[in-house]
């Protein structure tokens, strides 16, 4: 499976993303065809530049005739709708444009319909978005991952006047995305870059396991203290192929964040409340492990599994509800059984049963785990005055009858 990892050590913008794809092997003719399909009066040119000691691709959009200083959201969307771009590219481009407009609207306190795109009348943005999606499709990339994003400070002059950095619209789009501060006065993540990376990346963190084949460098417009480039790694994720060769079947795959902290001066009575708050805020799982900590003090480790977008919300709860002054987080791959739930009829009422299974190449299921839902079994046991083990046995027996009848 082809994947790309965006190493955003110097941030990301629309033209950096597009230039990095060109450096990875997307032909310029592919981009020029996209411009023709959009029917817009611009020419796109690529160039080779040096940013510090690194050679990189650069991209320039040149207007062929004077353009209005700005276009409304509806005007830009109309260009996409009337274009001959593939429908999938149209849909992705329109979705990004609407998210950009919604972010700008939230910042300015206006409806999205009143937002205007300014760079070359919004045509620059169109080229960056549609060109990037076409490049991803041309390279046959199935998944894209990205590093946490650096945010600098300072200000920038725009059509709306002087605004602080990071750009407010970019911050709106980066809600829930891992970022870190950089002591530099520069715009590292533009709104278009933020819209693209949040639309493309399935997770943010360290590079996933892969065999890397090529690295592309997309140049930013500014010259910084370090090479101002976006580094895109193109590779092959081979885990699925290896499993198929061994006949292991297909599993559900994903990535998850692991948050950990250790405390020795938090009241253990608070742990159930901490668990409930974390679960309500979207934690996938929460566990507590007893530890013997410094000076022989008894303590415990809090471990939380989380999706990338819930990282900071869950970290806030941990700091609020424990004595922790810091926590660690990392991204890990995970392999899971596919899951479904079936309701079965028992003498004690209808009981849901969770089923965990893998898929064989022919599409058939191999079931590994069957687990009646605890809360439903406990309720039925209380209502009928029987042991919970009896309800469990009845639910599993009913499921076996369904499986034997090949109804699932």
Image: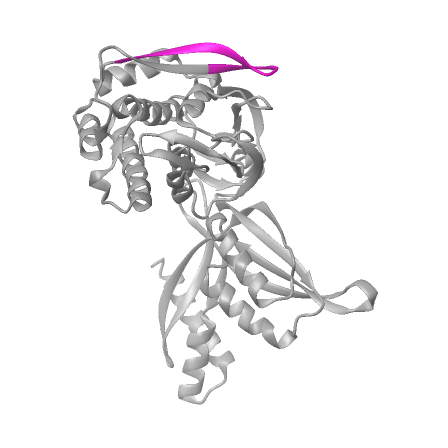
Q: Position of residue 231 (x, y in %)?
A: 53, 25
Vertical position of residue 401 compared to residue 133: above or below: below
Residue at horizontal 45 percent and vertical 65 percent from the top: 280
The C terminus sits in image quarter:
bottom left
Residue 251 visible (yes or no) = no
- Highlighted range, magenta: 42-57
Q: Residue furthest right?
A: 295
Q: Position of residue 224 (x, y in %)?
A: 56, 23
Residue at horizontal 29 percent and vertical 18 percent from the top: 34
- Asked which quadrant contains residue 96, the reply is top left
- Asked which quadrant contains residue 325, the reply is bottom right
Residue at horizontal 25 percent and vertical 33 percent from the top: 116
Vertical position of residue 77 compared to residue 109: above or below: above
- Asked which quadrant contains residue 319, the reply is bottom right
Q: Position of residue 53 (x, y in %)?
A: 61, 15
Q: What colour-coding does the image apply?
A: one colour
Q: Nearer the viewer, residue 93 or 348?
A: 93
**Left or right of residue 376: residue 65:** left
């Amino acid at each position: 499976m082809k994947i790309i990892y965006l190493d955003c050590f110097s941030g990301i913008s629309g033209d950096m993303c597009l230039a990095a794809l060109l450096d990875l092997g997307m032909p310029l003719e592919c981009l020029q065809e996209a411009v023709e399909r959009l029917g817009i009066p611009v020419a796109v040119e690529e160039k080779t530049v040096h940013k510090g000691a690194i050679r990189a691709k650069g991209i320039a959009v040149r207007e062929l005739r004077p353009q209005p200083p700005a276009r409304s959201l509806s005007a830009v969307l109309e260009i996409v709708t009337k274009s001959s771009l593939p429908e999938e590219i149209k849909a992705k481009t329109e979705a990004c444009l609407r998210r950009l407009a919604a972010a700008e609207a939230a910042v300015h306190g206006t409806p999205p319909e009143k937002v205007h795109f300014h760079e070359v009348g919004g045509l620059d943005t169109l080229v960056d978005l549609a060109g990037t999606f076409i490049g991803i499709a041309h390279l046959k990339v199935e998944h894209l991952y990205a590093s946490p994003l650096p945010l600098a400070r300072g200000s920038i002059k725009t059509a709306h006047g002087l605004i602080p950095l990071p750009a407010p619209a970019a911050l709106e789009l980066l809600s829930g995305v891992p970022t870190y501060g950089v002591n530099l006065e520069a715009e590292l993540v533009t709104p278009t870059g933020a819209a693209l990376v949040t639309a493309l990346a399935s997770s943010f963190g360290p590079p996933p396991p892969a065999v890397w084949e090529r690295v592309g460098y997309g140049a930013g417009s500014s010259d910084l203290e370090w090479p101002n480039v976006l580094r895109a790694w193109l590779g092959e994720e081979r885990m699925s192929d290896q499993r198929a060769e061994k006949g292991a079947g297909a599993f559900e795959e994903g990535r998850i964040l692991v948050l950990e902290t250790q405390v020795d001066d938090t009241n253990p009575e608070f742990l159930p409340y901490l668990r409930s708050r974390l679960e309500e805020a979207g934690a996938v799982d929460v566990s507590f492990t007893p530890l013997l900590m410094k000076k022989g003090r008894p303590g415990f480790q809090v471990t939380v599994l989380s999706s990338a977008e819930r990282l900071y919300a869950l970290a806030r709860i941990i700091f609020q509800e424990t004595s922790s002054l810091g926590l660690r987080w990392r991204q890990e791959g995970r392999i899971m059984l596919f899951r479904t739930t079936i309701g079965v009829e028992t003498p004690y009422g209808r009981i849901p049963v969770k089923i965990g299974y893998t898929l064989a190449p022919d599409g058939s299921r191999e079931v590994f785990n069957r687990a009646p839902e605890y809360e439903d079994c406990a309720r039925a046991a209380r209502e009928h005055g029987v042991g919970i083990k009896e309800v469990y046995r009845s639910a599993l027996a009913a499921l076996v009858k369904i499986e034997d009848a090949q109804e699932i």
